[in-house]
Image (cartoon, grey):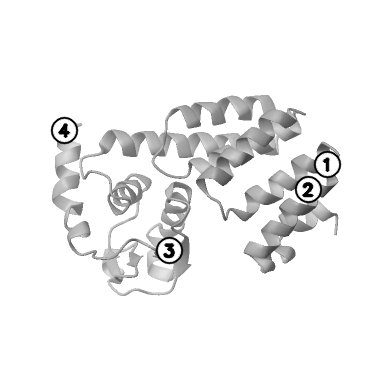
């Protein structure tokens, strides 16, 4: 473990020294070369670990194609290379989020929580809601440094499907406490209120979602909620 931390410090520690502004966004190159080097996995990993106020999106070529996958931290435009594994992406995210450069334990716990969420989503697709709830509770207990609002929202969906409306509402409120502009959580909240026959509250949740992002009206999740 100590050797891994030392290797990480020597390789990543210059990042913060090149960043003067507060991190606002991360973009991941998904152009051909970086894609072949694993940038899609990097995009999914960073998206699952990012703080709510830091969006992660794909972008075109950032140069340095031989050193990919490459990401860029905005607004300073610092390009970070060799982000081709989940572990590497997670360690970079720890540092970009202000964590210690030797936070190996934090990184490992966050990756484990992300993996548990992915497993839970698979169980939900198979309608194994109780198993999904257990996995998501384990993920929350790990206290990951980022992405916990996503975990709460997914557990809310599992609890809603199980008819545990109070638990589902509690979870979605936790998600919104962490990420006040989280549109999918507002949709989920609206669905919970609909299931509880609280139509005015459901309408308010959906309306708030649309105020934050009017384009969400065209999304699949929003159309399913309104049966359109």
Q: Nearer the viewer, mark 4 or mark 3?
A: 4
Q: Nearer the viewer, mark 4 or mark 2?
A: 2
Residue 88 against residue 219 in the figure, above or below = above
Q: Secondary structure at mark 4?
A: helix
Q: Position of residue 121 (x, y in %)?
A: 61, 39
Q: Position of residue 213 (x, y in %)?
A: 64, 65
Location of mark 3 (residue): 35
Q: Residue at x 75, y 47 (%)?
A: 190
Q: Position of residue 164 (x, y in %)?
A: 73, 27
Location of mark 1 (residue): 198
Q: Residues within 10 Å of mark 2 (few under 14, many from 20)?
A: many
Q: Secondary structure at mark 2?
A: helix
Q: Secondary structure at mark 1?
A: loop
Q: Are marks 4 and 2 in contact (CB under 8 Å)?
A: no
Q: Position of residue 79 (x, y in %)?
A: 28, 67
Q: Are marks 3 and 1 in contact (CB under 8 Å)?
A: no
Q: Quadrant of the C terminus?
A: bottom right
Q: Nearer the viewer, mark 2 or mark 3?
A: 2
Location of mark 4 (residue): 2
For residue 202, which numbered disc appears in the image? 2
Q: Are marks 4 and 3 in contact (CB under 8 Å)?
A: no
- Between the C-alphas of marks 1 and 4, the distance is 54 Å
- Between the C-alphas of marks 4 and 3, the distance is 31 Å
């Amino acid at each position: 473990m100590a050797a891994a931390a030392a290797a990480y410090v020597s390789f990543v520690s210059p990042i913060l020294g090149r960043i003067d502004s507060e991190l606002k966004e991360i973009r991941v190159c998904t152009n051909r070369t970086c894609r072949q080097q694993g940038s899609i996995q990097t995009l999914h990993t960073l998206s699952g670990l990012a703080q709510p106020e830091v969006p992660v999106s794909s972008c075109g070529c950032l140069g340095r194609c031989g050193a990919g996958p490459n990401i860029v931290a905005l607004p300073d435009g610092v390009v970070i290379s060799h982000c081709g594994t989940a572990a590497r992406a997670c360690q970079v995210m720890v540092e970009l989020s202000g964590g210690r450069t030797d936070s190996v334990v934090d990184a490992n716990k966050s990756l484990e929580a992300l993996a548990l969420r992915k497993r839970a989503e698979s169980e939900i697709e198979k309608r194994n809601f109780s198993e999904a709830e257990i996995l998501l509770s384990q993920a929350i207990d790990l206290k990951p440094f980022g992405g916990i609002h996503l975990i709460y929202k997914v557990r809310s969906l599992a609890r809603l499907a199980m008819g545990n409306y109070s638990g589902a509402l509690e979870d979605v409120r936790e998600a919104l406490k962490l990420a006040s502009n989280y549109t999918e959580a507002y949709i989920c909240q609206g669905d919970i209120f609909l299931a509880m026959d609280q139509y005015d509250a459901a309408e308010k949740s959906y309306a708030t979602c649309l105020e934050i992002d009017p384009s969400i009206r065209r999304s699949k999740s929003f159309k399913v909620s309104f049966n359109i």
